[in-house]
């Protein structure tokens, strides 16, 4: 695992939305938003310690799940265990939904990418429901998944959304692979990876093709009275919601709309929740251009690119690597590689030196073939890393 750990707690509800809610004329909405913002700020100081403790637990737990009930407290050690792998289903829907979401995410990574839990070594999956009261968020804190119940006015129980659960758990996968720093473009990629694989888990569980999927993140977290589609739209960044209380979705879908913000808490660490819309749209376009199940070729290209990335990888570097991986995993200049090039171009990013990158891909494929014929594992490993 990379030691450059994120300095911020990873929450599904973006801070710009919560800050907008502070302007509401409804005291219930204002108070819930303020409480959620304050709680998230406090948790940032605890996150690094928890993440370190999680990384130190090296013994495999085979991704075993435990879901506990906070009883509206914020003190996790006082939570009551409500469901385990051995126990029966709970009478509490939130407990069962969280338990199922943890399991779906675990099985997705195991079956699709042969990955043993978040860290690749069987890390246990702990979930906590009924965190605080009127808490409008769900978060991964470096070692466990925590769910709020929502304020009941705008937001509802966050365990209802499978892609929210998978989004937050994927922050763990990112920590244990690339360790993308949570700031500027690397931070936007961090958020985008969680949206990409969060959506893929939902599509995989529902056996939906790229054309059948809604490509929405958190469509279930709003109450029925709220006329908003979701927290984000990968298909149409900037159009997930337009609501008098929530405001308008601010995500860009092209580099010419890139949001430049300061690398501070108030600046969303350089706009990580804003600019993730750009790589989100690139993945959506790649998946729909290739067709079929998005967790197959597109998912494998993005997953291998994530593993090949480093903490400070930016959009251009990530795009270039998706091109290399598409050629390495599939065919040079094939359908998959062409789809990658077209997708990034549509969001304003041109693959750097396509011809030279194609030559590099061809060399990697020859090395891979040679490894298969002479059994030289070291050549095989080199080919995989390119």
Image: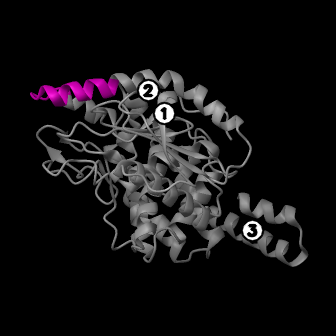
Q: Which residue is found at the position 20% from the left and 49% from the top?
A: 241
In the image, residue 77 sits, relative to residue 68, either above or below, namely above
Residue 45, percent from left and from top:
51, 21
- Asked which secondary structure carries label 1, the reply is loop
The residue labelled by disc 1 is 183
Between 382 and 82, the residue placed more toward the observer is 82
Q: CA distance from mark 1 to mark 3?
A: 34 Å
Q: Seen in the image, is 136 located left or right of residue 128? A: left
Cβ–Cβ under 8 Å for marks 1 and 2: yes
Number of the front mark, 3 or 2: 2
Q: Quadrant of residue 333?
A: bottom right
In the image, residue 210 sits, relative to residue 37, either above or below, namely below
Residue 274 visible in the current orientation? yes
Residue 215 falls inside the magenta stretch: no
- Tell which circle, 1 or 2, labels the residue nearer the N-terminal end: 1
Q: Which residue is found at the position 30% from the left and 52% from the top?
A: 237
Q: Circle 1: is it few (<14), some (14-19), or many (20+) Cα within 10 Å?
A: many
Instruction: Tell how many labels.
Output: 3
Q: Which residue is found at the position 39% from the left and 65% from the top?
A: 285
Q: Circle 3: is it few (<14), some (14-19), or many (20+) Cα within 10 Å?
A: some
Q: Seen in the image, is 264 located left or right of residue 316? A: left
Q: CA distance from mark 3 to mark 2?
A: 39 Å
Q: Which residues are magenta?
A: 22-37
Q: Circle 2: is it few (<14), some (14-19), or many (20+) Cα within 10 Å?
A: some
Cβ–Cβ under 8 Å for marks 3 and 2: no
The residue labelled by disc 3 is 363
- Tell which circle, 3 or 2, labels the residue nearer the N-terminal end: 2
The residue labelled by disc 2 is 263
Q: Main secondary structure of the magenta part?
A: helix
Q: Which residue is found at the position 73% from the left and 66% from the top?
A: 364
């Amino acid at each position: 695992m990379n030691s450059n750990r994120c300095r911020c707690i990873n929450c599904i509800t973006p801070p710009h939305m919560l800050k907008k809610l502070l302007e509401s004329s409804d005291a219930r909405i204002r108070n819930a938003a303020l409480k959620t913002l304050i709680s998230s700020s406090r948790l940032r100081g605890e996150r690094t310690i928890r993440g370190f403790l999680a990384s130190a637990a090296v013994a495999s737990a085979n991704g075993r799940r435990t879901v506990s009930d906070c009883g509206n407290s914020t003190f996790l050690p006082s939570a009551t265990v409500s469901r385990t792998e051995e126990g029966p289903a709970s009478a509490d829907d939130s407990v069962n939904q969280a338990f199922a979401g943890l399991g779906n995410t675990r099985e997705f990574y195991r079956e699709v990418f042969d990955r043993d839990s978040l860290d690749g070594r069987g890390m246990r999956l702990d979930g906590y429901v009924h965190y605080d009261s009127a808490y409008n968020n769900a978060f991964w804190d470096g070692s466990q998944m925590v769910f709020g119940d929502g304020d009941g006015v705008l937001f509802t129980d966050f365990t209802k959304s499978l892609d929210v659960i998978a989004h937050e758990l994927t922050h763990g996968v990112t920590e244990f692979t690339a360790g993308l720093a949570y700031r500027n473009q690397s931070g936007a990629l961090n958020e985008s990876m969680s949206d990409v694989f969060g959506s893929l888990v939902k599509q995989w569980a529902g056996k939906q093709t790229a054309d059948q999927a809604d490509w929405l993140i958190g469509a279930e977290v709003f109450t029925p009275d709220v006329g908003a589609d979701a927290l984000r739209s990968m298909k149409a960044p900037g159009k997930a919601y337009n609501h008098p209380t929530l405001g308008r979705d601010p995500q860009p879908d092209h580099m010419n709309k890139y949001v430049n913000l300061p690398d501070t808490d108030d600046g969303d660490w350089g706009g990580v929740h804003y600019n993730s819309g750009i790589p989100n749209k690139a993945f959506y376009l790649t998946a729909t251009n290739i067709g079929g199940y998005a967790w197959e070729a597109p998912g494998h290209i993005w997953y291998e690119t994530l593993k090949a990335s480093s903490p400070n990888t930016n959009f251009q570097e990530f795009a270039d690597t998706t091109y290399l991986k598409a050629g390495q995993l599939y065919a040079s200049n094939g359908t998959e590689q062409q789809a990658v090039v077209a997708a990034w171009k549509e969001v304003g990013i041109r693959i750097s030196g396509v011809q030279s990158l194609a030559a590099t891909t061809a060399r990697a494929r020859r090395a891979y073939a040679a490894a298969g014929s002479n059994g030289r594992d070291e050549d095989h490993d080199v080919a995989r890393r390119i």
